[in-house]
Image (tube, grey):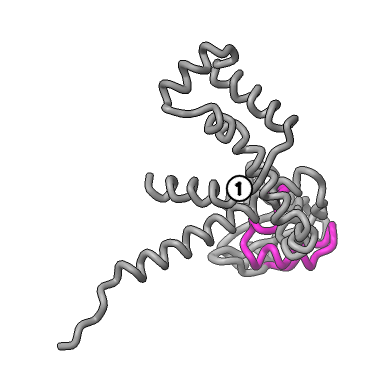
Amino acid sequence: MLPQFIQEILIDQAIGAIECTPEETAEACEQFYTQAQIGDEKARKTWLGRYGMSEEQLQALATRGVRIEKFKQETWAPKLESYFLSRKNQLDKVIYSLIRTKDMGIAQELYFRILEGEQSLGELARTYSQGPEAQTDGLIGPVELSVPHPTLAQLLTLSQPGQLCPPTRVGEWLVLVRLEKFIPAQLDEAMRRRLLDECFNTWLSDQLEKLGSISFHHSTPASTAS
């Protein structure tokens, strides 16, 4: 519980100077009152008494989420495009077909069968693939490029749709992989929200780590001369 408590203190310190407009405050309070079922003044006073809070503290609590979002916007929104570009190669999505086996002879045989059109990759995946993709005719995705094994992700990044890669060692497996579709990441509203959350969570983790290092430094006994 202590790290969570410290985390909330760090957030409160960060948003201390963030202000809401009267409209934002009114809307946030209304939503909080509805959620807590304290819409009328009598219920609100009872609630305040139960939790030992003032009206000002209640307002601060009700607007906390809004102020956190404003803090994210003010701190990271101006840098979001460059952050997106630095992450884009992990955020791009792919749909691909895969066969995995541990037998090089089988992998090579299947590779040539597919190349020569004797059988489809999907048909062979159902029979020979040794992973869950056997249940989907070898088809996987769409998934972000951060999801597959790094070697597999690199293969997919360098491939053209429809291109079948020769048997390649990926961890313990030999894989045949074919890129079906490449879906480039877009900096739309949903992606902006996700990346703002990422930046905020990274910042918060860094703050906690710094605080932990300081605490450890102060708690380490000074060395004494023997």
10 Å neighbourhood of mark 1: few (<14), some, or many (≥20)?
A: some
Q: Which residue is mark 1?
A: 15
Q: Please name the amino acid that badge 1 sits on.
A: Ile
Residue in front for this viewpoint, 178 or 193: 193
Q: Does residue 113 appear in this view? A: no
Task: Determine which quarter of the picture holds residue 189.
Answer: top right
Magenta span covers which residues?
Answer: 138-167
Residue 38 versus residue 116 in the image, above or below: above
Residue in front for this viewpoint, 115 or 218: 218
Q: Residue at point 59% right, 59% down?
A: 101
Task: Determine which quarter of the picture holds residue 58.
Answer: top right
- Disc 1, SS: loop
Residue 32 versus residue 225 in the image, above or below: above
Magenta residue check for 147? yes
Where the N terminus falls, by quadrant? top left
Q: Position of residue 85 (x, y in %)?
A: 78, 63
Q: Residue at point 73% right, 32% down?
A: 22
Where the C terminus falls, by quadrant? bottom left
